[in-house]
Image (spheres, helix red, strand yellow):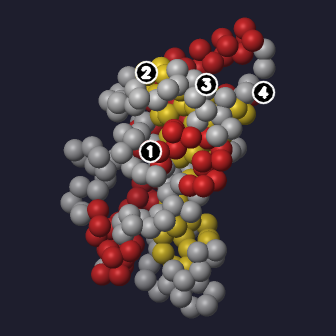
Amino acid sequence: MKRIVVLTGAGISAESGIKTFRDADGLWEGHDIMEVASPIGWENNPALVLDFYNKRRAQLLEVHPNEAHQILAELQSDFDVQIITQNVDDLHERAGSKNVMHLHGELLKVRSITDSEEIHHWTSDLNLGDLDKNGVQLRPHIVWFGEDVPMIEFAIDIVETADILVIIGTSLQVYPAAGLMNYVDQNVPVYYIDPKPATIYDLPNELKVLPLSAVEGMKVLREELIDSVNFMGK
């Protein structure tokens, strides 16, 4: 069974109604990014940071996976699908994908500010005074700007095993995530789905750019992948 490694960004979640901060009407509008998504912002005004993520968490609970998420889950019947996402929502999991790595954390989890291993599932508001087992404040389980991305080395290992690489809904401007595609073997075909695709034509790989939304692009790709399974066998 061939392994498809999928790198997803905000574009795939946008079609479920989750705004992206790079859009003109984006989620971060009205806030300096460093005020709500950095260690300095947390230190200066933790209440503002908590309120920001509480609103995001509440919105997440009101939206649903879209057809692009669902197609990726359906492909698991014919492929070993490994998803590496920059998104902090749980829409891949809710659609049925089994192997999902979150590079930038998860909105429905919180953790201790002093013990990164103490992580809790969390679906309600997180407030000042919500403490870990040692009486220390809890914070969103999010990788903020200026923080290390602890899962990046594991993600590189997965990309290196790909038989097919699919990139969906990302501007390829946020590092180190944007650099993951450079670890794929040069003989691996790469598909890039985005309505406004970045220029990645310097890759030595066979590259097919689908300048489409995540949903429309995945409809096209699904047919191509399933046709290849029917022709070559699993």
Is disc 1 in contact with disc 4, using a CB cutoff of under 8 Å?
A: no
- The 10 Å Cα crowd at callout 3, few under 14, some 14 to 19, many 20 or more, is few
- In terms of secondary structure, where does tag 1 sit? helix
Q: Percent x, y for residue 116?
A: 58, 75
Q: Who's the residue at 29% across and 56% down the image?
A: 28
Q: Percent x, y for residue 53?
A: 40, 65
Q: Who's the residue at 56% across and 40% down the image?
A: 183
Residue 93 visible, this angle = no
Number of the label disc, if any, that sits on residue 144: none
Spatial CA distance of label 4 from label 2 is: 25 Å
Q: Mark 1 points at which residue?
A: 178
- In terms of secondary structure, where does tag 4 sit? loop
Q: In terms of image quadrants, where is residue 1?
A: top right
Number of on-image labels: 4
Spatial CA distance of label 4 from label 3 is: 17 Å
Task: Give the residue type that dot 2 points to.
Answer: Leu
Residue 224 visible, this angle = yes
Number of the label disc, if any, that sits on residue 210: 2
Question: Mark 1 or mark 2, which is nearer to you?
Answer: 1
Report the side of 89 relative to 35 (left or right).
Answer: right
Number of the label disc, if any, that sits on residue 187: 3
Task: Give the residue type that dot 1 points to.
Answer: Ala
Q: For the C terminus, give its image quadrant.
A: top right
Question: Mark 1 or mark 4, which is nearer to you?
Answer: 1
Q: From this view, report whether residue 131 is shown above or below residue 95.
A: below
- In terms of secondary structure, where does tag 2 sit? strand
Task: Give the residue type that dot 3 points to.
Answer: Asn
Q: Percent x, y for residue 15?
A: 42, 36
Q: In terms of image quadrants, where is residue 224?
A: top right
Q: Earlier in the sequence, mark 1 or mark 3?
A: 1
Q: Mark 4 points at which residue?
A: 1
